[in-house]
Amino acid sequence: MTPNTKIGHEYQPATEAEFLVAYKKQKFPKPSVTVDLTIFTVVDGLLQVLLILRDGHPFKDCWALPGGYLNVEEDETDPSNQGEDLEEAAHRELEEETSLPQHSCHLEQLCTFGKSGRDPRGRVITVAYMALVRSSLAPLIKPKDDAKDARWFTLDEIKALGVPLAFDHDTILDTAIKRLRGKIDYSPVAFDLVPETFTVGELRLVYEAVKGETYDPNNFHRRFKRMQTDGIIVPTKGKRATLTRTAAVYRFKR
Amino acid sequence: MTPNTKIGHEYQPATEAEFLVAYKKQKFPKPSVTVDLTIFTVVDGLLQVLLILRDGHPFKDCWALPGGYLNVEEDETDPSNQGEDLEEAAHRELEEETSLPQHSCHLEQLCTFGKSGRDPRGRVITVAYMALVRSSLAPLIKPKDDAKDARWFTLDEIKALGVPLAFDHDTILDTAIKRLRGKIDYSPVAFDLVPETFTVGELRLVYEAVKGETYDPNNFHRRFKRMQTDGIIVPTKGKRATLTRTAAVYRFKR
DNA sequence: TTAATAGTGTCTCTCAGACAATATGCG
DNA sequence: CGCATATTGTCTGAGAGACACTATTAA
């Protein structure tokens, strides 16, 4: 890395130990770092996103993606502990927001946004993550139904708000949707949106909700069977689920 | 975003203006943010990466990806100016390192790394970018050939160093290679590694260098012709280039 | 002339889209 | 029973991989 001379990052004594002692005494402006989450689920064949209503400034009373500051408090007694990792913070936020047990949801880093002026409090860089909540877990998330502070939105409902989301969260959400739509074609993310066991129809509904287009049920079934012969999907004993008739139940492998 | 109570992010007066005044007076620990670049090129049919030799602590005398601090100095007279954007910083670093004119290279955000302990100076979050330099520009980059401070490495040469790169740059590089290998199949990144005008063979060599595998020249040619009928590629007047015989020359469209 | 690469043609296999047909079981 | 969905099957066309073949030209 090329140190920035203007803010004094390049003082260079002989040993690294000496350097660090001197370095710690210096002061240069730093940004804040936050972690924001785009939490998706598919319920009733609709792609939905979890938004929270901000109760404090800035963007008070605006809907926003859940998120929070990255904890970077250094441990005085252990210099190697410089606070929580980014993934750790994302998992923490996800748990705080959904009350779901850690690692019950797929979580992946999406993109980092840091435009000057995106937060009136000062320079804030946000690392956006995308989380996928399987439909069987989604209903567990909204216990505080009366309190209007967190709820699932379909994409149309967000548009229907008529006002933008807080900060640059519209851009983040847009990036997340594009990423999800792209990834579903070549990676097994769909299996993180469906219940642990599922029927062909349920999986197809997830694809349709994410891509926003209909799939020919016959062709999808063929594709599904190929996944079965490839060992990606295995049949499950509990061989029934009810829609208009019975259907075989499967489970994702690995 | 959910403010972190422990570091006092949630003081909430009535108006946003009042809030901001009070907020600015607070102090909480912040990380540094850097931008690191993985700069690729393909020369002589080999995928190469630009590394610099660190002349200061930490990781003095280690090879590293070029990078530097994000400038977040706020403008006292203009509160909306909170420093340079992430992309701006990446372009600046790229120009500083390669001396190539701005926007002559493809540049895209890769991933953000922020593990606790990755930098002994303190908590540092780095936003990694991937840059692609077309082979016709690559030779322009190493004027300081005697000074051993920046040069192209093939992947094998990096392995042959026998020591890891500085910081977590091995991980970043690995991520970049995987991204490039993945993207070349479904996006036109190869055209950012080839000269502005190119022959079928030159384009194939780029694919082979990136993927690390050989392509059947006949089948590749067929694929190439399909791109031509799709209008992605157009023939160019200067219809010759020399290897062992002449070949038609093409240009990427859009 | 020769050798290496450009460029064409062919066969096979896989997979996607369109669409026909049968099976099943809830109402 | 009737109908919606599950499940199977067939036809076609696009594209990938393997491989044979001809054309061109620098050395």
Image (tube, coloured by chain):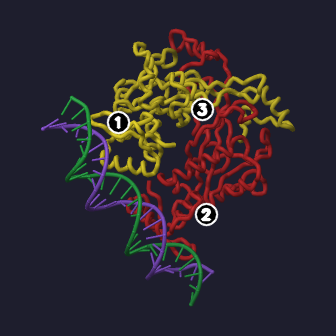
Chain colours: A yellow, B red, C green, D purple
Determine if marks 2 and 3 fall on one subunit: no
Residue A15 in view, yes or no: yes
Q: Residue at x 63, y 48 (%)?
A: B174
Q: Is residue A178 visible?
A: no
Which of these two is toward me, B176 or B42? B176
Mark 2, residue position: B45
Image-quadrant location for residue B88:
top right
Observer-nearest residue: D7 or A45? D7
In this rendering, which labeled residue sits more in front, label 2 or label 1?
A: 1
Amino acid type for the residue under numbered disc 2: Gly
**Residue located beneath label 3 in the image:** A87
Who is closer to the viewer here, A72 or A5? A72
Above-or-below relation of B22 to B187: above
Q: Which residue is mark 1?
A: A240
At label 1, counting other C-alpha atoms closer than 10 Å, the crowd grade (few under 14, some 14-19, many 20 or more) is some
Label 3: few (<14), some or many (≥20) within 10 Å?
Answer: some
